[in-house]
Every structure is written in structure tokens, then in C-alpha cells.
């Protein structure tokens, strides 16, 4: 039997049967991840978002939010998992194909680029070809970050990487933003988080990111 997920208490997304990719996490963090993404979208100028690409499309929860908020004229999504790709292909207005983000990231020019990595932190973010994305100068980039959940455990690691003490989420965001600015000319302007975090990156130097904890 097919099921439906309710997104942010506003939109229903019918789901095909599936097991791979984001299907495995539907019962855990999905709802609050969606709330984080919606929070960041609310800080974007709607007319500036005419085209959107998602390199980790999952089952299309974020795609549904994108369609409902921005009504983009072009919207692409990739995922490496075949069940997720089949599901993404059911979403009206979305062009979905299979693709490994190591190869797809930066292949498409879009106003909003979404990288909802399965796992990613300051230590591993450079394993992804973000340079290919930022070279195209999108207006907005959203990236997920999984460090917060274990920040207490890995303080020493992040402090060593950053060369300054990293104790709190505020410290981590400051360091992450500086790193993105120095490497790519993007900085973190807004953060939405629960145990995972989502960062909104913009091509300007932020004086300090606004951090929101979602319920
Ligand atoms: C956090 S989920 C994305 C959820 C998505 N935002 C949604 O709304 O459903 C991460 C997704 O990345 C996919 N993935 C993992 N490694 C990948 C890779 N190398 N290239 C593309 N997709 C990948 C997984 O299959 C999974 O569906």
C-alpha cells in the first residue's frame, strides 16, 4: 500500500514503495529537516528563485516545499538511489534523474542549489565538489550539516581544524562561514537546526548568521 507524508503540516506527498536512500530515514529526522529547510526558504526572495537544483533529492520532501513556495520555471533533482529517483519522478514540475553528486554537483546553473548531504561536517565538506557549484555563483545555496549532534564529542577535532576553540554551535557556524568565505566567496547568513543543521549560504560576507532552532 502506498503512503503519504505530511510536510510541515501543510502539504501531502504521496510516496511510492521504496527502501533505499532517504526512505530509510523517513521515520526519524525527516519532519524536522523539512521544518529547517522551510525556515531557510522563508529568508529567500521568492522572485529571485526561478530555477532550483537539488543534488540529493531523496523522496522529494524538499522538492515539494520548493514547488509550493517558489513555483520555479525550472527544477531539477538527482539522487543516487533508484527508489528515490522513481519517487522524485512522480513530482509534478520536477525533472529527476539518477546521478552521483560527485559527478552532478555544479553541472546545472540555478538560482537555488540544495545539497542535503546524508552526512557532512566541516571535516568532510571538501570531499564534495562545492567549487563546481560556487563557480556558477547561485543566489542561494543550502547545505546540511550533521556535526551538531556530536559537537561535544568532537570539539577538539573542530578546534584543531579551525585553529580556534569550537565549543558551541555559534562557534562552529562562525568557523564554517569563514571557511566557506575564504574558499568559495560564500558565507552563512542563516542557520536552522534541530540535532542536524541547515545553512543558508549567500555570495556576500555575513556579519553573523541568524540561528533558529526549529521545533
Ligand atoms: C538527507 S537525504 C535527502 C532528503 C531530501 N532532501 C528529501 O527531501 O527527501 C540524502 C539523500 O542523498 C542520497 N545520496 C547519498 N549519496 C549520494 C550521492 N553520492 N549522490 C547523490 N545522492 C546521494 C541518498 O540516497 C538520500 O536519498
Image (spheres, rainbow, N blue to C red):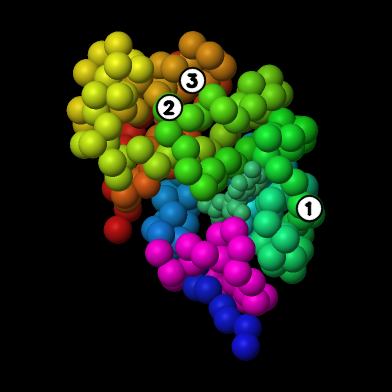
x and y percentages locating residue 171 in the rendered image: 26, 25
Give the farthest residue toward the bottom. 1
User: Which of pointers 2 and 1 lies earlier in the amino acid sequence?
Assistant: 1
Asked if residue 19 is among those painted magenta in the image, a careful observer would answer: yes
Q: Secondary structure at mark 2?
A: loop
Q: Is residue 201 rendered to the left or right of residue 21?
A: left
| Among the 4 quarters of the image, the one containing residue 96 | bottom right
Instruction: Give the mark nearer the N terminus: 3 vs 2.
Output: 2
Horizontal and vertical percent for residue 180? 48, 20
- Can you say whether 79 is above or below 158 in the image? below
Q: Residues within 10 Å of mark 1 (few under 14, many from 20)?
A: many
Among the 4 quarters of the image, the one containing residue 58: bottom right
Camera-side residue of 105 and 210: 105
Identify whether 118 is placed above or below 32: above
Could you tell me which secondary element the residue under label 1 belongs to?
Answer: strand
Decide: few, some or many residues near mark 3? Use Cα within 10 Å; few <14, some 14-19, many ≥20.
Answer: many
In the rendered view, tell whether residue 35 sits above or below residue 185: below
Please name the residue that numbered disc 2 is placed on. Answer: 123
Q: Nearer the viewer, residue 100 or 131?
A: 100
Q: Is residue 166 above or below residue 32?
A: above
**Answer yes or no: do the residues labelled 1 and 3 have beta carbons within 8 Å?**
no
User: Do we see residue 124 in this rendering?
Assistant: yes
Give the residue displayed 61% in from the left and 63% down from the top: 20
Residue shown at 71% from the left, 43% from the top: 100
Disc 3 to disc 2, C-alpha distance: 13 Å
- Region of the chain picked out in magenta, as a range: 8-28
Ligand 1 closer than 8 Å to label 2 CB: no
Q: Determine whether label 3 and label 2 are within 8 Å by CB.
A: no
- The residue tagged 1 is 97
Under circle 3, the secondary element is: helix
Which residue in the protein does label 3 denote? Answer: 180
Amino acid at each position: 500500500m502506498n503512503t503519504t507524508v505530511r510536510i510541515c503540516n501543510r502539504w501531502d506527498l504521496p510516496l511510492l514503495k521504496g527502501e533505499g536512500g532517504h526512505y530509510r530515514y523517513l521515520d526519524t529526522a525527516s519532519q524536522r529537516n523539512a521544518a529547517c529547510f522551510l525556515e531557510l526558504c522563508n529568508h529567500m526572495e521568492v522572485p529571485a528563485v526561478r530555477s532550483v537544483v537539488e543534488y540529493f533529492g531523496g523522496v522529494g520532501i524538499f522538492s515539494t516545499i520548493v514547488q509550493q513556495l517558489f513555483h520555479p520555471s525550472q527544477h531539477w533533482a538527482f539522487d543516487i538511489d533508484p527508489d528515490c529517483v522513481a519517487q522524485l519522478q512522480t513530482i509534478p514540475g520536477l525533472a529527476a534523474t539518477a546521478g552521483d553528486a560527485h559527478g552532478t554537483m555544479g553541472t546545472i546553473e540555478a538560482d537555488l542549489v540544495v545539497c542535503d548531504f546524508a552526512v557532512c561536517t566541516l571535516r568532510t565538506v571538501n570531499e564534495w565538489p562545492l567549487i563546481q557549484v560556487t563557480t556558477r555563483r547561485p543566489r542561494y545555496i543550502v547545505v546540511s550539516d550533521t556535526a551538531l549532534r556530536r559537537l561535544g564529542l568532537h570539539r577538539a577535532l573542530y578546534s584543531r581544524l579551525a585553529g580556534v576553540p569550537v565549543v558551541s554551535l555559534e562557534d562552529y557556524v562562525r568557523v564554517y562561514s569563514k571557511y566557506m568565505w575564504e574558499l568559495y566567496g560564500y558565507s552563512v547568513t542563516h542557520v536552522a537546526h534541530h540535532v542536524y543543521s541547515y545553512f543558508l549560504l549567500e555570495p556576500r560576507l555575513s556579519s553573523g548568521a541568524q540561528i533558529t532552532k526549529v521545533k
